[in-house]
Image: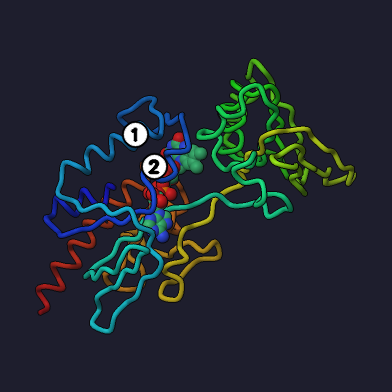
């Protein structure tokens, strides 16, 4: 959205293709580090972004990009589930999506107790028992949020917590403490019509525990949405798009911004900054290209 605003301000003819509105900020109620807002929920912040986008004549299409081609004349073809678009320059800002556990029962019970978004689905588990899987910021944040509504919250982490100290402190200060299983592997989600139990195994003793839960929140990290540019771009070992410090990929005219890139820090302010940078560098690229003709 930031890249779109910057391209519009440069009077470029831009189209924004997006699968869903808002991206990852839609999954959190608690943003305390986006400058200008001391505290704001993710969906509210994205509404503010959207209001700003709509001040400009930016064409927005809700479509999923499925492939990207670099043509012999240096232009790009962007293919989506809604059509095909030709562009002189492309900015990839497709972010990340939740990683799956890949254990038996997970796929079967997704939407029937298994969820990847505690903020969105937490209220559905009022007075029920839930398990949160993970030990990073997202998992602990999810445990903190859900502890306000659920009857019991189990937090299952494969290793010691990797969350920031301030988030760990918040978890320890909860009025209704969560039940922690640190050093446990989740091996199966079980149930009939919906989730009924979760099987975990102690990494050292190999002792198995079956927890009675109705909800399982998987918060074990994110994967980059980079599949559609496989084959034309260089990825790092995490499948992130490799860019230089000016958001340029190795292909002239193709830029990448935000969480989908190899930039080490994943934050809204950084993604937005990258988006602004990518639009300005794309503008510079297009000016030079026009000058060359
Ligand atoms: C639970 C949680 C809490 C967080 N809390 C904070 C916080 O407090 N402060 C902070 O600064 N950061 C926070 N973050 C991180 C922050 O949300 C990300 O760094 C930021 O959203 C990255 O922005 P992005 O635009 O690069 O990607 P995303 O937000 O992931 O957006 C990518 C967009 O691209 C779309 N897309 C993906 N693939 C395609 C495709 N093939 N075709 C079309 N569209 C596609 C998606 O639908 C989405 O709209 C949090 C993240 C999570 C998960």
Q: Is residue 134 above or below residue 289?
A: above
Q: Is residue 83 above or below residue 188?
A: below
| Residue 128 badge | none
| Disc 1 crowd, CA 10 A, few/some/many (<14, 14-19, 20+) | some
Q: Secondary structure at mark 1?
A: helix
Q: Where is the C terminus found, in terms of image quarters?
A: bottom left
Q: Are marks 1 and 2 in contact (CB under 8 Å)?
A: yes
Closer to the chain start, of discs 1 and 2, is: 1
Q: Nearer the viewer, residue 219 or 152?
A: 152
> In this orientation, does residue 94 appear?
no
> In this orientation, does residue 45 appear?
yes
Q: Secondary structure at mark 2?
A: helix
Q: Which residue sits furthest bottom? A: 72
Q: Residue at x 28, y 54 (%)?
A: 61
**Residue labelled with disc 1:** 45
> Residue 66: percent from the left, percent from the top?
41, 66
**Residue labelled with disc 2:** 268
Q: Nearer the viewer, residue 194 or 173?
A: 194
Q: Quadrant of residue 292?
A: bottom left
> Residue 177: percent from the left, percent from the top?
69, 21
Q: Residue at x 39, y 48 (%)?
A: 20
Q: Nearer the viewer, residue 150 or 241?
A: 150
54 on left or right of 168: left
46 on left or right of 262: left
Is ligand 1 within 8 Å of the beta carbon of the residue shown at mark 2? yes
């Amino acid at each position: 959205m930031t890249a779109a605003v910057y391209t519009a301000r440069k009077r470029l003819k831009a189209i924004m293709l997006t699968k869903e509105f808002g991206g990852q900020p839609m999954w959190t109620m608690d943003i305390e580090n986006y400058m200008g807002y001391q505290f704001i929920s993710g969906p509210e912040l994205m509404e503010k972004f959207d209001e700003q986008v709509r001040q400009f004549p930016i064409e927005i299409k809700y479509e999923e990009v499925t492939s990207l081609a670099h043509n012999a004349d240096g232009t790009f073809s962007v293919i989506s589930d809604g059509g095909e678009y030709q562009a002189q320059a492309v900015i990839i800002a497709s972010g990340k999506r939740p990683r799956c556990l890949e254990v038996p029962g997970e796929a079967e019970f997704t939407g029937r107790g298994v969820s990847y978004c505690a903020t969105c689905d937490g209220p559905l588990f009022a007075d029920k028992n839930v398990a949160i899987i993970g030990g990073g910021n997202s998992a602990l944040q999810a445990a903190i949020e859900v502890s306000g509504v659920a009857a019991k919250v189990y937090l299952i982490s494969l290793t010691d917590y990797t969350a920031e100290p301030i988030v760990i402190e918040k978890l320890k200060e909860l009025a209704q403490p969560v039940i922690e299983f640190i050093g446990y592997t989740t091996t199966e989600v079980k149930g009939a019509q919906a989730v009924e139990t979760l099987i975990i195994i102690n990494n050292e003793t190999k002792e198995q525990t079956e927890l009675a839960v109705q909800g399982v929140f998987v918060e074990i990290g994110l994967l980059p949405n980079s599949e559609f540019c496989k084959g034309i771009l260089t990825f790092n070992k995490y499948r992130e798009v490799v860019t230089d410090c000016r958001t340029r990929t190795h292909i002239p005219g193709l830029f990448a911004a935000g969480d989908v890139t190899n930039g080490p820090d994943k934050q809204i302010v950084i993604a937005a900054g990258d988006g602004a940078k990518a639009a300005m560098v794309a503008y510079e690229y297009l000016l030079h290209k026009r000058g060359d003709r």
